[in-house]
Image: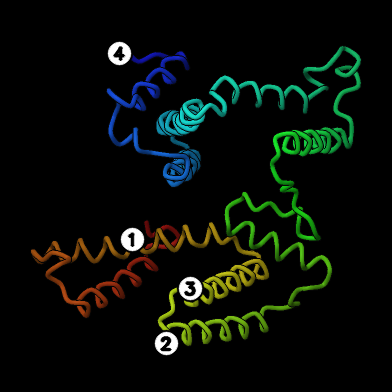
Amino acid sequence: MEPSNNIDRLIEIMKALRDPETGCPWDQKQDFKSIIPYTVEEVYEVADAIERNDKYDLCEELGDLLLQVVYYAQMAEEEGSFNFGDVVYAITKKMIRRHPHVFGSPAQRKKGLIKGEWERIKKEEKAERSEKRKSANLPDDTPKGYLACVKSTQPLEKEAIALQQRAAEVGFDWTDPAPIFAKIDEEVKELKDALQSKNKKDIEDEFGDVYFTLLNLARRLGVSPRTTLKNANQKFRYRFNFIENELNKNNKSLNDASLDEMEKLWNEAKVESRRKQPNPQ
């Protein structure tokens, strides 16, 4: 089989990988849920290539992301739900419908983009979706309540901050960081108590409360959790690499070094990184 720039070849490859008799054992045993982590990972790798402005890697990563779509579509076709063609039809229908000023009648194109048109079309789509689910005897999953407009399908950190912002609009919010620090102390204490009980569910719940409150502090301080964590990751990489390099100079490996040795070198790395500011990496 030869590579091709035709999407049909990629679909053909996926069918072959999933073939129950001649396919790849790893691909054969995957299901919708098992490949979710790989899909999320590919999205982040696309974002990383864009942030690095590396178009060569971007092309590769977009291909990996496209493979995920084909993967899900193949599994759906196997169970008789839908196929890749249905996926393409659904998105082309949506894009054409949502852009009447581009794809509509001559009169619609002449009017151009009308204020409120996007919201009206999305409202119609939601009504149609609800009707289709009803016809298929599926439950009404339309979110209800004041927080319904906050999507649960976005990255969890963004969802947490969006929930906090939404609540703040009706006054459910702290006006300055001081009480948030007090809340963090309270949640940390509860986490410590949960650790004493050694109940994993309690530990997870209390850690979640600490994390949620820290995100609230980030929102109040006006900093991006993603950016700050990315910077922290970069600092950790730099400092840990510094430890490894210094040990190598003395013909020692990470496994040979004691924690005290590594901590000493860690502090040296911090001094070195400050000296090389603004970009220690």
Residue 79 in sight here? yes
Query: What number is the disc on residue 196?
Result: 2
At mark 1, the secondary structure is helix
At mark 2, the secondary structure is helix
Q: Nearer the viewer, residue 142 or 133?
A: 133
Residue drawn at x 50%, y 77% as measured from the top left: 202
Q: Looking at the picture, which amino acid does disc 4 mark?
A: Met
Identify the mark nearer the N-term, 2 or 4: 4
Q: Position of residue 40 (x, y in %)?
A: 48, 45
Other-residue count near label 4 (Cα within 10 Å), few / some / many at <14 / 14–19 / ≥20: few
Q: Residue 104: which quarter of the image?
A: top right
Q: Nearer the viewer, residue 89 or 163?
A: 89
The Cα atoms of the two marked residues, 1 and 3, are separated by 35 Å
Q: Looking at the picture, which amino acid does disc 3 mark?
A: Lys
Q: Looking at the picture, which amino acid does disc 2 mark?
A: Gln
The Cα atoms of the two marked residues, 1 and 4, are separated by 43 Å
Identify the mark nearer the N-term, 2 or 3: 2
Query: What number is the disc on residue 238?
Result: 1
Q: Are marks 2 and 3 in contact (CB under 8 Å)?
A: no
Q: Which residue is mark 3?
A: 201
Residue 58 in sight here? no
Residue drawn at x 26%, y 63% as measured from the top left: 242
Identify the mark nearer the N-term, 4 or 3: 4
